[in-house]
Image: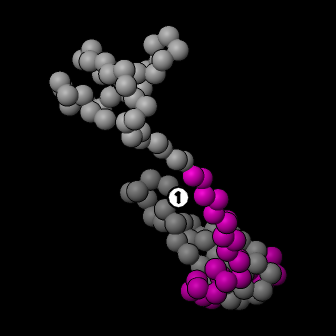
Amino acid sequence: MFCPKCKNLLMVKKEGNKKILACSCGYKESKIEDKPMIKEKVSIEHKAVEVIDDELELRTLPKTEAECPKCHHRIAYFWLKQTRASDEPETKFLKCEKCKHLWRDYS
């Protein structure tokens, strides 16, 4: 319902034990029983959390020749990430294909 004076939305207020429709401009309407009311229904949807398999994620990364410092395997997955200021070079992360050891290459 809208105020006939200023066209603002009328709000439900309590005056004693009666409910009335009132506007901020001072307009009041006491008959609200036969008027349609705006009702809000809030529904909360719970979404399942997706778990990404590490193996599946690794298979999409490129491989390079790099010796693992832990098991000395010569193939590793790699990716680049900006870990410092934007005017400095990216950090290269490597993950061993065999033992999954993770290390950084700053060169």
**Neighbour tally class for label 1: few under 14, some 14-19, many 20 plus, Cα within 10 Å:** few
Q: Is residue 60 left or right of residue 10?
A: right
- Residue at 71% across / 77% down in the picture? 53
Q: Nearer the viewer, residue 96 or 18?
A: 18
Look at the picture and state if 102 lies above or below 98.
above
Is residue 66 visible in the rendered structure shown here? no
* Magenta-highlighted residues: 43-72
x, y (%) of residue 42? Answer: 54, 47
Look at the picture and state if 39 lies above or below 12.
below
Is residue 97 visible in the rendered structure shown here? yes
Q: Quadrant of the C terminus?
A: bottom right
x, y (%) of residue 57? Answer: 64, 80
Look at the picture and state if 56 lies above or below 9.
below
Magenta residues: mostly which secondary structure?
Answer: loop
Q: Nearer the viewer, residue 104 or 25?
A: 25
Magenta-colored stretch includes residue 11: no
Residue 69 found in image quarter: bottom right
x, y (%) of residue 52? Answer: 67, 74
x, y (%) of residue 77? Answer: 63, 82
Q: Quadrant of the N terminus?
A: top left
Look at the picture and state if 7 lies above or below 96.
above
Q: Secondary structure at mark 1?
A: loop
Q: Mark 1 — residue?
A: 83
Residue 23 found in image quarter: top left
Magenta-colored stretch includes residue 67: yes
